[in-house]
Image (cartoon, rainbow, N blue to C red):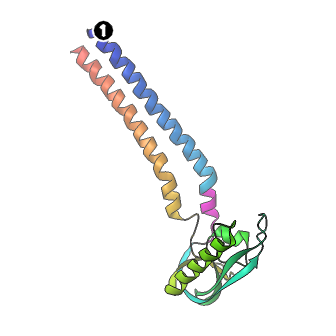
Amino acid sequence: MGKKLVMAQKRGETRALCLGVAMVVCAVITYYILCTTVLPLYQKSVWTQESTCHLIETNIRDQEELEGKKVSQYPCLWVNVSAVGRWAMLYHTEDTRDQNQQCSYIPRSLDNYQKARADVEEVRDKFHKRQDFYCFSTTQENETSVLYQRLYGPQVLLFSLFWPTFLLTGGLLIIAMVKLNQSLSILAAQK
């Protein structure tokens, strides 16, 4: 009976150690991936200054061509705001600015023109309801554009690092508990 109990404990401890080590290894791999993908984007982001934007005008342009995509035309929203004491063009995110500098907002669904138009009108109505809102600008003096939402802000970075940290902590706790259990069983066997 005693030998079977020791073997079962040994097998369980081995499995728990393997689980803890696997969790730590997965956390390290995830940290590496995040540090090579998300962290450089966060560090390169120049949109760090949060300011208050005031809506000046909005306009829906119906016939826009998106470069690099096989969409012939789509409606896009064009928004002018007053931010940091000067006129600026508002972009939804960094990607919107890179895709088409003439559009403030590009609809999600570009396949159906009517759905895209309804999406753009809904966003325009939300801007008209809230004339003042927070936006992100750069510290460069000659920049005439601001962002409504940052893709690579501190919240995204913290959320990305939460799960690997949780995994690493859990794995280290499992390893520590197994080692503590082993040392306590050795102390109990010596007495």
- Quick one: SS at disc 1? helix
Q: Position of residue 143 (x, y in %)?
A: 68, 81
Q: Position of residue 87 (x, y in %)?
A: 64, 89
Q: Is 81 placed left or right of 175 in the picture?
A: right
Neighbour tally class for label 1: few under 14, some 14-19, many 20 plus, Cα within 10 Å: few
The answer to which quarter of the image holds residue 12 is: top left
Amino acid under disc 1: Lys
Q: Position of residue 55 (x, y in %)?
A: 57, 88
Q: Magenta span has 17? A: no
The chief SS type of the magenta part is helix
User: Please, is residue 135 above or below residue 6 in the view?
Assistant: below
User: Please, is residue 36 above or below residue 46 in the view?
Assistant: above
- Residue 142 seen in render: no
User: Please, is residue 182 above or below residue 71 in the view?
Assistant: above
Q: Residue at x 65, y 66 (%)?
A: 109
Q: Position of residue 119 (x, y in %)?
A: 60, 74
Q: Residue at x 54, y 41 (%)?
A: 28
Badge 1 is on which residue?
3
The answer to which quarter of the image holds residue 128 is: bottom right
- Residue 48 seen in render: yes
User: What span is colored magenta in the figure?
Assistant: 39-47
- Quadrant of image for the N terminus: top left
